[in-house]
Amino acid sequence: MDQPNFRHAEPSDYQPIIAVLDAWWGGRHMADMLPKLFFVHFRSTSFVAEHKGEIAGFLIGFVSQTFPDEAYIHFVGVNPEFRTLGLARRLYEQFFVSVSALGCRTVRCVTSPVNTESIRFHQRMGFQPEGSARTADGVPMVLDYDGKGEDRVLFTRQVTPVQRATNGLFKA
Amino acid sequence: MDQPNFRHAEPSDYQPIIAVLDAWWGGRHMADMLPKLFFVHFRSTSFVAEHKGEIAGFLIGFVSQTFPDEAYIHFVGVNPEFRTLGLARRLYEQFFVSVSALGCRTVRCVTSPVNTESIRFHQRMGFQPEGSARTADGVPMVLDYDGKGEDRVLFTRQVTPVQRATNGLFKA
Protein backbone atom coordinates (compact mmCIF):
# COMPACT_ATOMS: atom_id res chain seq x y z
CA MET A 1 0.00 0.00 0.00
CA ASP A 2 1.20 3.53 -0.73
CA GLN A 3 2.15 5.43 2.39
CA PRO A 4 -0.34 8.07 3.60
CA ASN A 5 0.57 11.74 3.49
CA PHE A 6 0.78 13.68 6.75
CA ARG A 7 -0.50 17.25 7.02
CA HIS A 8 -2.05 19.64 9.55
CA ALA A 9 -5.69 19.06 10.47
CA GLU A 10 -8.21 21.47 8.93
CA PRO A 11 -11.79 22.34 9.89
CA SER A 12 -12.95 20.57 6.71
CA ASP A 13 -11.56 17.29 8.12
CA TYR A 14 -14.11 17.37 10.91
CA GLN A 15 -17.21 16.18 9.03
CA PRO A 16 -15.61 13.07 7.47
CA ILE A 17 -13.97 12.15 10.79
CA ILE A 18 -16.97 12.68 13.06
CA ALA A 19 -19.16 10.69 10.63
CA VAL A 20 -17.06 7.53 11.14
CA LEU A 21 -15.61 8.12 14.62
CA ASP A 22 -17.98 5.90 16.60
CA ALA A 23 -17.58 3.14 13.97
CA TRP A 24 -13.78 3.31 14.33
CA TRP A 25 -14.31 2.71 18.07
CA GLY A 26 -16.49 -0.35 17.43
CA GLY A 27 -19.72 1.56 18.06
CA ARG A 28 -18.64 3.20 21.33
CA HIS A 29 -20.02 6.76 21.54
CA MET A 30 -17.01 9.03 21.26
CA ALA A 31 -18.25 12.05 19.32
CA ASP A 32 -19.09 14.19 22.39
CA MET A 33 -15.40 14.13 23.31
CA LEU A 34 -14.36 15.63 20.00
CA PRO A 35 -16.16 18.90 19.24
CA LYS A 36 -15.18 20.73 16.09
CA LEU A 37 -13.32 23.40 18.06
CA PHE A 38 -10.18 21.25 18.12
CA PHE A 39 -10.05 21.23 14.30
CA VAL A 40 -10.43 25.01 14.23
CA HIS A 41 -8.30 26.32 17.07
CA PHE A 42 -5.48 23.75 17.45
CA ARG A 43 -4.46 23.14 13.84
CA SER A 44 -0.75 23.83 14.34
CA THR A 45 -0.45 20.80 16.67
CA SER A 46 -3.07 18.53 15.09
CA PHE A 47 -2.42 16.20 12.16
CA VAL A 48 -4.17 14.07 9.59
CA ALA A 49 -2.77 11.07 7.69
CA GLU A 50 -4.46 10.96 4.31
CA HIS A 51 -4.40 8.14 1.73
CA LYS A 52 -5.85 8.83 -1.74
CA GLY A 53 -8.28 11.38 -0.34
CA GLU A 54 -9.38 9.15 2.55
CA ILE A 55 -8.53 9.96 6.16
CA ALA A 56 -6.40 7.11 7.49
CA GLY A 57 -5.78 8.60 10.93
CA PHE A 58 -5.60 11.81 12.93
CA LEU A 59 -4.11 13.28 16.10
CA ILE A 60 -5.53 16.24 18.05
CA GLY A 61 -3.12 17.95 20.42
CA PHE A 62 -2.25 21.34 21.83
CA VAL A 63 0.31 23.30 23.78
CA SER A 64 -0.71 23.80 27.41
CA GLN A 65 -1.61 27.44 28.04
CA THR A 66 -0.95 26.97 31.76
CA PHE A 67 2.46 25.35 31.20
CA PRO A 68 3.91 26.56 27.86
CA ASP A 69 6.66 23.94 27.99
CA GLU A 70 4.10 21.11 28.09
CA ALA A 71 1.99 19.68 25.28
CA TYR A 72 -1.07 17.45 25.51
CA ILE A 73 -2.43 14.81 23.14
CA HIS A 74 -6.21 14.82 23.45
CA PHE A 75 -7.47 12.38 20.85
CA VAL A 76 -5.95 9.96 18.33
CA GLY A 77 -7.83 7.80 15.88
CA VAL A 78 -6.72 5.38 13.17
CA ASN A 79 -9.06 4.02 10.50
CA PRO A 80 -9.33 0.23 11.14
CA GLU A 81 -8.38 -0.37 7.48
CA PHE A 82 -5.00 1.29 8.10
CA ARG A 83 -4.05 -0.24 11.46
CA THR A 84 -0.93 -2.16 10.49
CA LEU A 85 1.09 0.73 9.07
CA GLY A 86 2.37 2.31 12.26
CA LEU A 87 0.29 5.43 11.65
CA ALA A 88 -0.28 6.17 15.32
CA ARG A 89 3.47 6.09 15.91
CA ARG A 90 4.09 8.45 13.00
CA LEU A 91 1.35 10.83 14.16
CA TYR A 92 2.91 10.93 17.62
CA GLU A 93 6.39 11.48 16.17
CA GLN A 94 5.07 14.35 14.06
CA PHE A 95 3.50 15.85 17.18
CA PHE A 96 6.75 15.51 19.15
CA VAL A 97 8.64 17.33 16.39
CA SER A 98 6.09 20.13 16.19
CA VAL A 99 5.74 20.80 19.90
CA SER A 100 9.51 20.56 20.41
CA ALA A 101 9.84 23.36 17.86
CA LEU A 102 7.25 25.33 19.86
CA GLY A 103 9.36 25.06 23.02
CA CYS A 104 7.71 22.08 24.72
CA ARG A 105 9.81 19.60 26.68
CA THR A 106 7.05 17.38 28.11
CA VAL A 107 4.16 15.63 26.37
CA ARG A 108 1.20 14.39 28.39
CA CYS A 109 -1.79 12.24 27.58
CA VAL A 110 -4.47 10.34 29.46
CA THR A 111 -6.00 6.96 28.74
CA SER A 112 -8.39 4.52 30.42
CA PRO A 113 -7.18 1.60 32.57
CA VAL A 114 -9.36 -0.80 30.53
CA ASN A 115 -7.69 0.27 27.27
CA THR A 116 -4.74 -2.09 27.56
CA GLU A 117 -3.88 -1.66 23.88
CA SER A 118 -3.52 2.09 24.40
CA ILE A 119 -1.47 1.58 27.57
CA ARG A 120 0.95 -0.76 25.78
CA PHE A 121 1.23 1.63 22.82
CA HIS A 122 2.15 4.54 25.08
CA GLN A 123 4.71 2.43 26.93
CA ARG A 124 6.28 1.42 23.59
CA MET A 125 6.36 5.13 22.65
CA GLY A 126 8.41 5.91 25.75
CA PHE A 127 5.67 7.32 27.98
CA GLN A 128 5.81 6.78 31.76
CA PRO A 129 2.63 6.39 33.83
CA GLU A 130 2.09 8.28 37.08
CA GLY A 131 -0.22 7.64 40.03
CA SER A 132 -0.38 5.70 43.28
CA ALA A 133 -3.14 3.18 42.42
CA ARG A 134 -2.60 0.30 39.95
CA THR A 135 -4.52 -1.16 37.02
CA ALA A 136 -5.25 -4.89 36.85
CA ASP A 137 -1.98 -5.21 34.92
CA GLY A 138 -0.04 -3.28 37.55
CA VAL A 139 0.24 0.00 35.64
CA PRO A 140 0.14 3.10 37.89
CA MET A 141 -3.06 5.15 37.56
CA VAL A 142 -5.04 7.94 39.26
CA LEU A 143 -8.44 7.03 40.74
CA ASP A 144 -11.45 9.23 39.87
CA TYR A 145 -9.26 11.47 37.69
CA ASP A 146 -12.03 12.41 35.23
CA GLY A 147 -14.85 12.22 37.81
CA LYS A 148 -16.16 9.58 40.19
CA GLY A 149 -15.37 6.10 38.88
CA GLU A 150 -13.46 7.58 35.93
CA ASP A 151 -9.97 6.28 36.73
CA ARG A 152 -7.24 7.23 34.27
CA VAL A 153 -3.66 6.34 33.39
CA LEU A 154 -1.68 9.59 33.13
CA PHE A 155 1.25 9.32 30.75
CA THR A 156 4.22 11.66 30.46
CA ARG A 157 7.12 11.67 28.04
CA GLN A 158 10.00 14.07 27.61
CA VAL A 159 10.79 15.46 24.16
CA THR A 160 14.05 17.11 23.21
CA PRO A 161 14.67 20.04 20.90
CA VAL A 162 17.10 17.98 18.80
CA GLN A 163 14.35 15.57 17.71
CA ARG A 164 13.91 15.77 13.94
CA ALA A 165 11.33 14.65 11.41
CA THR A 166 12.44 11.44 9.71
CA ASN A 167 11.29 8.90 7.20
CA GLY A 168 8.72 10.86 5.24
CA LEU A 169 7.30 12.95 8.08
CA PHE A 170 6.48 16.34 6.74
CA LYS A 171 8.17 19.39 8.16
CA ALA A 172 5.82 21.61 10.16
CA MET B 1 -26.44 37.43 49.51
CA ASP B 2 -22.73 38.19 49.61
CA GLN B 3 -21.16 38.47 46.19
CA PRO B 4 -19.06 35.52 45.04
CA ASN B 5 -15.34 35.87 44.57
CA PHE B 6 -13.85 35.39 41.11
CA ARG B 7 -10.54 33.58 40.60
CA HIS B 8 -8.77 31.41 38.03
CA ALA B 9 -9.92 27.81 37.70
CA GLU B 10 -7.68 25.17 39.26
CA PRO B 11 -7.41 21.40 38.73
CA SER B 12 -8.87 20.90 42.22
CA ASP B 13 -12.10 22.58 41.04
CA TYR B 14 -12.74 19.73 38.64
CA GLN B 15 -14.04 17.10 41.07
CA PRO B 16 -16.68 19.30 42.76
CA ILE B 17 -17.83 20.65 39.39
CA ILE B 18 -18.01 17.35 37.50
CA ALA B 19 -19.91 15.77 40.42
CA VAL B 20 -22.80 18.25 40.01
CA LEU B 21 -22.53 19.16 36.32
CA ASP B 22 -25.28 16.92 34.98
CA ALA B 23 -27.57 18.02 37.83
CA TRP B 24 -26.96 21.70 36.94
CA TRP B 25 -28.14 20.81 33.40
CA GLY B 26 -31.35 19.19 34.70
CA GLY B 27 -29.96 15.67 34.31
CA ARG B 28 -28.68 16.09 30.74
CA HIS B 29 -25.39 14.18 30.31
CA MET B 30 -22.74 16.86 29.89
CA ALA B 31 -19.65 15.42 31.60
CA ASP B 32 -18.10 13.92 28.44
CA MET B 33 -17.80 17.43 27.03
CA LEU B 34 -15.73 18.62 29.96
CA PRO B 35 -12.67 16.47 30.56
CA LYS B 36 -10.31 17.57 33.30
CA LEU B 37 -7.72 18.75 30.78
CA PHE B 38 -9.43 22.13 30.54
CA PHE B 39 -8.90 22.73 34.28
CA VAL B 40 -5.23 21.80 33.96
CA HIS B 41 -4.06 23.37 30.71
CA PHE B 42 -6.26 26.48 30.24
CA ARG B 43 -6.23 27.99 33.70
CA SER B 44 -5.14 31.48 32.61
CA THR B 45 -8.39 31.95 30.66
CA SER B 46 -10.74 29.90 32.85
CA PHE B 47 -12.55 31.22 35.93
CA VAL B 48 -14.51 30.14 38.94
CA ALA B 49 -17.00 32.18 40.99
CA GLU B 50 -16.87 30.95 44.56
CA HIS B 51 -19.26 31.73 47.43
CA LYS B 52 -18.28 30.62 50.95
CA GLY B 53 -16.29 27.70 49.59
CA GLU B 54 -19.03 26.58 47.20
CA ILE B 55 -18.63 26.87 43.43
CA ALA B 56 -21.33 29.22 42.17
CA GLY B 57 -20.28 29.17 38.52
CA PHE B 58 -17.38 28.66 36.14
CA LEU B 59 -16.17 29.51 32.65
CA ILE B 60 -13.72 27.45 30.58
CA GLY B 61 -12.07 29.27 27.69
CA PHE B 62 -8.82 29.46 25.79
CA VAL B 63 -6.84 31.46 23.27
CA SER B 64 -6.98 29.93 19.79
CA GLN B 65 -3.61 28.44 18.85
CA THR B 66 -4.51 28.70 15.16
CA PHE B 67 -5.58 32.36 15.45
CA PRO B 68 -3.74 34.01 18.37
CA ASP B 69 -5.97 37.09 18.17
CA GLU B 70 -9.08 34.97 18.78
CA ALA B 71 -10.37 33.45 21.99
CA TYR B 72 -12.99 30.76 22.47
CA ILE B 73 -15.42 30.09 25.31
CA HIS B 74 -15.96 26.34 25.54
CA PHE B 75 -18.15 25.78 28.56
CA VAL B 76 -19.97 27.92 31.11
CA GLY B 77 -21.99 26.70 34.06
CA VAL B 78 -23.87 28.46 36.85
CA ASN B 79 -25.13 26.69 39.95
CA PRO B 80 -28.97 26.88 39.84
CA GLU B 81 -28.94 28.36 43.36
CA PHE B 82 -26.94 31.35 42.08
CA ARG B 83 -28.79 32.10 38.84
CA THR B 84 -30.16 35.58 39.57
CA LEU B 85 -26.87 37.32 40.33
CA GLY B 86 -25.58 37.95 36.81
CA LEU B 87 -22.70 35.52 37.36
CA ALA B 88 -22.55 34.41 33.73
CA ARG B 89 -22.21 38.03 32.63
CA ARG B 90 -19.43 38.64 35.13
CA LEU B 91 -17.59 35.47 34.09
CA TYR B 92 -17.79 36.57 30.44
CA GLU B 93 -16.60 40.07 31.33
CA GLN B 94 -13.65 38.62 33.22
CA PHE B 95 -12.80 36.47 30.21
CA PHE B 96 -13.01 39.48 27.87
CA VAL B 97 -10.58 41.41 30.08
CA SER B 98 -8.14 38.51 30.31
CA VAL B 99 -8.05 37.63 26.63
CA SER B 100 -7.85 41.29 25.62
CA ALA B 101 -4.72 41.54 27.74
CA LEU B 102 -3.38 38.46 25.91
CA GLY B 103 -3.83 40.19 22.54
CA CYS B 104 -7.20 38.79 21.46
CA ARG B 105 -9.63 40.97 19.54
CA THR B 106 -12.36 38.41 18.79
CA VAL B 107 -14.22 36.04 21.12
CA ARG B 108 -16.10 33.06 19.69
CA CYS B 109 -18.49 30.55 21.16
CA VAL B 110 -20.95 27.97 19.93
CA THR B 111 -24.39 27.05 21.26
CA SER B 112 -27.32 24.85 20.23
CA PRO B 113 -30.33 26.20 18.31
CA VAL B 114 -32.68 24.65 20.90
CA ASN B 115 -30.97 26.53 23.74
CA THR B 116 -32.95 29.75 23.33
CA GLU B 117 -31.89 30.98 26.77
CA SER B 118 -28.23 30.73 25.76
CA ILE B 119 -28.92 32.44 22.42
CA ARG B 120 -30.65 35.36 24.13
CA PHE B 121 -27.85 35.64 26.70
CA HIS B 122 -25.19 35.86 24.00
CA GLN B 123 -27.18 38.44 22.08
CA ARG B 124 -27.52 40.55 25.26
CA MET B 125 -23.74 40.19 25.72
CA GLY B 126 -23.13 41.72 22.30
CA PHE B 127 -22.41 38.54 20.32
CA GLN B 128 -23.45 38.30 16.66
CA PRO B 129 -24.52 34.98 15.11
CA GLU B 130 -23.21 33.78 11.77
CA GLY B 131 -24.54 31.24 9.25
CA SER B 132 -26.93 30.99 6.33
CA ALA B 133 -29.62 28.75 7.86
CA ARG B 134 -32.04 29.97 10.57
CA THR B 135 -33.31 28.69 13.91
CA ALA B 136 -37.05 28.53 14.61
CA ASP B 137 -36.67 32.02 16.10
CA GLY B 138 -34.90 33.33 12.99
CA VAL B 139 -31.37 33.36 14.44
CA PRO B 140 -28.65 32.53 11.87
CA MET B 141 -27.01 29.14 12.39
CA VAL B 142 -24.77 26.56 10.66
CA LEU B 143 -26.31 23.19 9.81
CA ASP B 144 -24.42 20.00 10.82
CA TYR B 145 -21.62 22.10 12.36
CA ASP B 146 -20.71 19.54 15.06
CA GLY B 147 -21.61 16.48 12.95
CA LYS B 148 -24.72 15.30 11.10
CA GLY B 149 -27.85 16.74 12.70
CA GLU B 150 -25.72 18.75 15.15
CA ASP B 151 -26.67 22.27 14.05
CA ARG B 152 -25.04 25.12 15.97
CA VAL B 153 -25.33 28.85 16.44
CA LEU B 154 -21.85 30.36 16.02
CA PHE B 155 -21.40 33.57 17.99
CA THR B 156 -18.68 36.18 17.56
CA ARG B 157 -17.95 39.33 19.53
CA GLN B 158 -15.16 41.86 19.26
CA VAL B 159 -13.22 42.85 22.37
CA THR B 160 -11.06 45.91 22.66
CA PRO B 161 -7.79 46.38 24.51
CA VAL B 162 -9.22 49.33 26.48
CA GLN B 163 -11.77 47.11 28.24
CA ARG B 164 -11.10 47.11 31.97
CA ALA B 165 -12.22 45.07 34.94
CA THR B 166 -14.97 46.86 36.84
CA ASN B 167 -17.31 46.38 39.74
CA GLY B 168 -15.52 43.79 41.78
CA LEU B 169 -13.99 41.77 38.95
CA PHE B 170 -10.56 40.66 40.02
CA LYS B 171 -7.51 41.67 38.02
CA ALA B 172 -5.95 38.77 36.13
Image: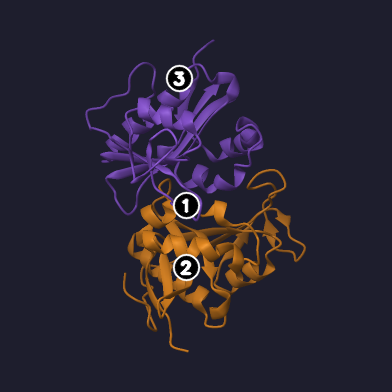
Chain colours: A orange, B purple
Identified by mark 1, the residue type is: Asp
Total marks in image: 3
Q: Which chain carries label 1?
A: B
Residue A115: give x, y in percent of width and height: 67, 64
Q: Residue B146 carries which label?
A: 1
Asked whether B116 or A9 is in front, the reply is B116
Would you call the spot at circle 3 few (<14 residues within 10 Å), some (14-19), or many (20 or more)? few
- Give the residue at the far right of this rendering: A136
Identified by mark 3, the residue type is: Gly
Quadrant of residue A6 within the rendered picture: bottom left
In the image, taking residue A18 as reference, residue A4 lies left or right, namely left
Task: Choose mark 2 or mark 1, whichever is in front.
Answer: 1
Cα distance between the residues tagged 3 and 1: 29 Å
Task: Choose mark 3 or mark 1, whichever is in front.
Answer: 1
Q: Which chain carries label 3?
A: B
Cα distance between the residues tagged 2 and 3: 41 Å
Cα distance between the residues tagged 2 and 1: 17 Å
Residue highlighted by disc 3: B86
- Give the residue at the far top of this rendering: B1
Residue A64: give x, y in percent of width and height: 43, 51
Q: Do labels 2 and 3 share a chain?
A: no
Q: Which chain carries label 2?
A: A
Would you call the spot at circle 2 few (<14 residues within 10 Å), some (14-19), or many (20 or more)? many
Residue highlighted by disc 2: A58
In the image, taking residue A119 as reference, residue B111 lies left or right, namely left
